[in-house]
Image (cartoon, rainbow, N blue to C red):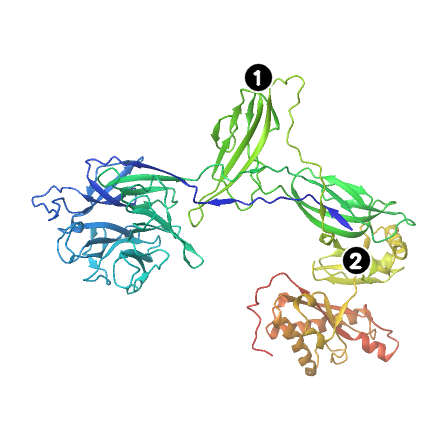
């Protein structure tokens, strides 16, 4: 037996950061001054600047004579900076103030400033050290600053940056115990303040100086370092979480880094643009950067979508002597007679394919031998929608409608149409001016991932452009072709087909009259015509939760066909042959040792149930047996139980049916009282209708008085929180 299926090629997305392209341009801040270490906040940014204040007493650096550092705010309107304004008088002191960091929606600030004396940030004597200081905004006013608990008189703590949630504080320090030079540290926010600083370790830090950290929304940190291998003195690097550690820092490319000092990186939440500072042009200046991925990288040839299949089977039964034939129902309204069926689906979708045996006289289904849930899908790839052949001078629409990339959302679409034309958008239009063969490229871009890396899907496709008339007029001797599915057939493993009769199974065939979600009395008028010829057998299917009603039993098609024919004759129009599978009988000793998968469909038969004659309640001596069944339910929360109670034929049929239903219910009540959820239990009393033995003997009647437990394993594998484990 085999099914033939197209081979699907799965194309994986390209994830890349190394090929990102940066741009950088200097902000035109007026009046011009030395500005550095910007931090984005609200609709602008705060920067550290060496500017002359408009005040009676001017403070300058005792070595350089330059103004001391202060914090300034700059508004951005349509990307253009406004005039720098002093941040707040209470935060500006005779000391060097800055850089700054903000948390709690801007209501918490952490400032770097001199600790002991009003000395310059640059050129100060060796006994001056920098520290971190915190202030909180209440309304429009800032509180008095509070020093960082871990500032020290013999080392510096500086250049703070908060994580996006404000729960981590990164900073630079030359405190003892580091890797050498200045290192980067992190503290966690606690109820009392900040935890003891932790060095970020030798992957990030080294014998060089690491300064000016910036913690991004994506969990990565950008920082500046004068380590070897950079483009200049201080270069900007990036590192992110990777397998419980930090990744090896990577230097940003030019034009962000340069031959000068590049520092103070800050970015918007999406990481695609931001600011930094550099002295590449002589003085310290603020620069704006943008980050874009390199387009059309790692492109692959577009694959044709193929919806064509061949279904084949050898057939289990010989139908030559009966008015029966095999027929494939392909799930889209197509039916093909025989054991081989080539077929092309019109579109992707989910189709239930069935191999049926059909009655040629009534044209109805006699028996369903096998079925398969077939998912027809496009190749996982970006897809260029355009005809293979085009005419010069014709306006052509390009599209991406047949792109199939589960879990991926394209935020940008970029096109290279092969003739030097580059376009963007989901549905561009273009007219080719010259005949020729062109390679069209489509690059779909997703949003950056947690590490700031872009995901893209790029495909190529060849189109042929031939000379023709402009407009909609067809051109002589040529035919514009479109991209239709191919007609190649590929093999699907045969074990994908669900067989109604398992290989080697000694199953019985029966004629199913109909099914019902509700139970129907066997004395119902609907059964009167058929009961004159065959007894009606009632069964409950725990998988579908419906009752089935069938007649007859045989092991061959010839043996069951007469029963089927009679059912049709009596106007049971929906009747078809069903399989009655062999019961997987287990005893109590086996049950506790079976794995979960072996429990599915198993039947535990107990003939030693102790019920008083005519009573529904069982003797207490039966309790330990039920407790063993309950232990299986407790061990496997996925198991559901059908409780089937049976009687002998002593008494009327109606009274025995009611008695057995009551006994099944009493067992359910016992289980529920001991913590088993009722929705995992189904009580069914069959009365005297399902005997195992002859009721004319005492031994036969004893065998027929029984309880059977049918176990079904559901898909849910989570523990059952409602099961009371206090009971044995």
Q: CA distance from mark 2 to mark 1?
A: 63 Å
Count of all numbered marks drawn on residues in the image: 2
Q: Residue at x 31, y 35 (%)?
A: 78
**Residue 210 in view, yes or no:** yes
The answer to whether 632 appears left or right of 38 in the picture is right
Image coordinates for residue 137, horizontal then vertical, percent: 23, 53
The answer to whether 202 appears left or right of 404 in the picture is left
Residue lying farthest to the bottom in this orientation:
621
Quickly name the residue at label 2. 501
703, above or below 83, in the image: below
Q: Nearer the viewer, mark 2 or mark 1?
A: 1
Give whichever of discs 2 and 1 has the lower sequence position.
1
Residue neighbourhood size for the residue with mark 1, other residues' Cα within 10 Å, grouped as few (<14), some (14–19), many (≥20)? some
Quickly name the residue at label 1. 470
Residue neighbourhood size for the residue with mark 2, other residues' Cα within 10 Å, grouped as few (<14), some (14–19), many (≥20)? some
- Quarter of the figure that contains the C terminus: bottom right
Residue lying farthest to the right in this orientation:
321
Image coordinates for residue 574, horizontal then vertical, percent: 80, 50
**Residue 681 in view, yes or no:** no
Image coordinates for residue 464, horizontal then vertical, percent: 60, 25
Residue lying farthest to the front in this orientation:
228
Image coordinates for residue 166, horizontal then vertical, percent: 33, 55
């Amino acid at each position: 037996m085999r099914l033939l299926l197209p081979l699907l090629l799965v194309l994986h997305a390209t994830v890349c950061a190394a090929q990102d392209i940066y741009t950088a341009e200097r902000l035109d801040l007026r009046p011009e001054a030395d500005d550095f270490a910007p931090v984005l906040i609200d609709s602008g940014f705060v920067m550290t600047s060496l500017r002359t204040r408009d005040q009676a007493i001017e403070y300058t650096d005792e070595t350089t004579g330059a103004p001391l550092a202060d914090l300034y705010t700059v508004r951005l309107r349509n990307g253009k900076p406004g005039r720098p304004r002093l941040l707040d008088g209470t935060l500006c002191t005779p000391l060097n103030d800055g850089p700054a960091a903000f948390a709690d929606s801007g209501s918490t600030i952490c400032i770097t400033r001199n600790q002991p004396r009003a000395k310059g940030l640059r050129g100060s004597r060796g006994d001056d050290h920098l520290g971190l200081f915190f202030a909180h905004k209440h309304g429009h006013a800032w509180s008095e600053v509070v020093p960082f608990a871990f500032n020290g008189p013999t080392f510096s703590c500086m250049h703070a940056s908060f994580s996006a949630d404000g729960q981590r504080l990164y900073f630079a320090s030359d405190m003892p115990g580091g890797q050498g030079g200045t290192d980067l540290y992190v503290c966690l926010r606690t109820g009392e303040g900040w935890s003891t600083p932790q060095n970020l370790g030798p992957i990030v830090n080294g014998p060089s100086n690491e300064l000016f950290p910036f913690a991004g929304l994506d969990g990565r940190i950008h920082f500046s370092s004068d380590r070897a291998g950079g483009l200049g003195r201080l270069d900007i690097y990036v590192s992110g979480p990777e397998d419980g550690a930090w990744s090896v820092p990577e230097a940003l490319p030019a034009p962000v880094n340069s031959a000068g000092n590049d520092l103070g990186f800050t970015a918007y939440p999406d990481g695609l643009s931001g600011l930094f500072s550099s002295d590449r042009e002589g003085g310290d200046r603020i620069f704006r950067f943008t980050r874009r991925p390199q387009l059309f990288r790692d492109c692959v040839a577009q694959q044709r979508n193929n919806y064509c299949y061949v279904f084949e089977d050898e057939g289990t039964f010989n139908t030559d002597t009966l008015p029966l034939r095999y027929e494939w129902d392909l799930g889209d309204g197509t039916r093909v007679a025989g054991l081989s069926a080539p077929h092309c689906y019109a579109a992707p979708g989910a189709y239930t394919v069935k191999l049926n045996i059909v009655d040629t006289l009534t044209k109805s289904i006699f028996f369903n031998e096998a079925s398969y849930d077939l998912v027809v899908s496009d190749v996982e790839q970006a897809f260029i929608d355009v005809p293979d052949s085009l005419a010069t001078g014709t306006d052509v629409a390009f599209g991406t409608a047949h792109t199939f990339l589960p879990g991926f959302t394209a935020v940008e679409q970029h096109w290279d149409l092969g003739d030097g034309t580059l376009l963007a958008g989901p549905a561009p239009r273009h007219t080719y001016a010259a005949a020729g063969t062109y390679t069209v490229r489509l690059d779909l871009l997703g949003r950056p991932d947690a590490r700031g890396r872009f995901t893209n899907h790029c495909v190529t496709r060849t189109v042929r452009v031939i000379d023709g008339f402009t407009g909609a007029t067809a051109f002589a001797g040529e035919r514009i072709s479109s991209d239709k599915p191919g007609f190649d057939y590929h093999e699907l493993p045969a074990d994908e087909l669900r067989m109604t009769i398992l290989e080697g199974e000694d199953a019985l065939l029966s004629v199913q009259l109909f099914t019902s979600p509700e139970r129907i009395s066997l004395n119902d008028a609907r059964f009167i015509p058929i009961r004159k010829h065959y007894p009606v057998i009632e069964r409950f299917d725990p998988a579908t939760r419906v009752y089935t009603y069938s007649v007859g039993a045989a092991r061959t098609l010839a043996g069951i066909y007469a029963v089927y024919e009679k059912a049709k004759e009596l106007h049971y129009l929906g009747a078809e042959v069903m399989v009655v599978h062999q019961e997987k009988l287990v005893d109590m000793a086996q049950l506790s040792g079976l794995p979960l998968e072996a429990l599915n469909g198993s039947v535990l038969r107990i003939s030693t149930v102790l019920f008083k004659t005519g009573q529904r309640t069982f003797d207490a001596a039966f309790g330990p047996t039920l407790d063993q069944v309950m232990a299986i339910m407790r061990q496997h929360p996925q198991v559901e139980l059908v409780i089937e109670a049976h009687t002998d034929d002593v008494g009327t049929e109606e009274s025995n049916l009611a008695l057995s239903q009551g006994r099944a219910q009493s067992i359910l009540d016992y289980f529920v009282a001991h913590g088993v959820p009722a929705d995992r239990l189904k009580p069914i009393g069959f009365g005297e209708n399902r005997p195992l033995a002859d009721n004319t003997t005492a031994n036969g009647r004893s065998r027929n008085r029984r309880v059977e437990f049918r176990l079904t394993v559901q898909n849910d594998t989570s523990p059952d929180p409602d099961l009371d484990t206090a009971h044995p």
